Amino acid sequence: MSGGQPLRAALARGALRRPLNLAGFLICAALLGFAVYAQFDLHLDPCPLCIFQRIGIASIGVLFLLATLHHPRRWGGTVYAVLIGVAALATLAVAARQIYLQHLPPGSVPSCGAPLSVMLQFMSVTDVIRKVLTGSGECGIVNWTFLGLAMSEWVLLWALALGAIGVLVNLRALRPADSRAG
């Protein structure tokens, strides 16, 4: 029996679903905690795309927490897998947009717009989302890196990893004895 067999067997039985969902939630909480630390202690004010990425990570975290508390069977696990996957893809898309803006040549980055709070006062939510996702000059600035990666690149990697874990754990962790719906 290979070294990966016990892990695969535990995943197939659903024994690791709850602990891995809890781990996903805790990772999201840690990422948001670091974002708050970066904002208030490192004085790195978040741009509109950064705020949307925070909302995405928070959404993934809430879904992981709900999956942990609910510990669903059969189709319920599929629902959580899909919701976590969608939230992760949305977060990944916003992070990818910011990375694109950060890698544009100087002079081709769109000009800075109004702060998010001002836009929300004078525009509809759909117009704000459309405006924010087009990005602005402040979204193209890299003012923090770790191991050569900007914060948006880290968010992209974490969203990809969390989404993959959330989908795999909640789809694959269906116990054979769990024939009841829910």
Image: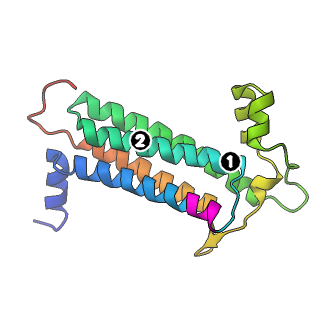
Percent x, y for residue 104? 80, 58
Q: Nearer the viewer, mark 1 or mark 2?
A: 2
Compared to 147, does 20 lie above or below? above
- Residue 22's disc is none
Tell me which residue sits at (48%, 37%) in the image.
86
Q: Is residue 106 in sight in this rendering? A: yes
* Side of 78 relative to 105 (left or right): left
Image quarter in which the N terminus is found: bottom left
Image quarter in which the C terminus is found: top left
Compared to 111, does 31 lie above or below? below
- Residue 62's disc is 2
- Which residue is labeled 1 in the image? 49
Q: Which residue ends up furthest to the right in the rendered image?
A: 107
* Magenta stretch: includes residue 84: no
Tell me which residue sits at (18%, 59%) in the image.
7
Magenta span: predominant SS is helix
* Magenta stretch: includes residue 38: yes
Q: What is the CA distance from the residue labelled 1 to the residue labelled 2? A: 20 Å
* Range covered by the magenta-colored residues: 35-41
* Side of 142 relative to 54 (left or right): right
Q: Which secondary structure lies at badge 2?
A: helix
Q: What amino acid is labelled 1 in the image?
A: Leu
Percent x, y for residue 138? 79, 54
Percent x, y for residue 53? 59, 48
* Side of 177 relative to 44 (left or right): left
Q: Please say if the residues under marks 1 and 2 sit with CB atoms less than 8 Å apart.
A: no
Percent x, y for residue 100? 72, 54
Q: Nearer the viewer, residue 53 or 11?
A: 53
* Rendering quarter of residue 38: bottom right
Q: What amino acid is labelled 2 in the image?
A: Val
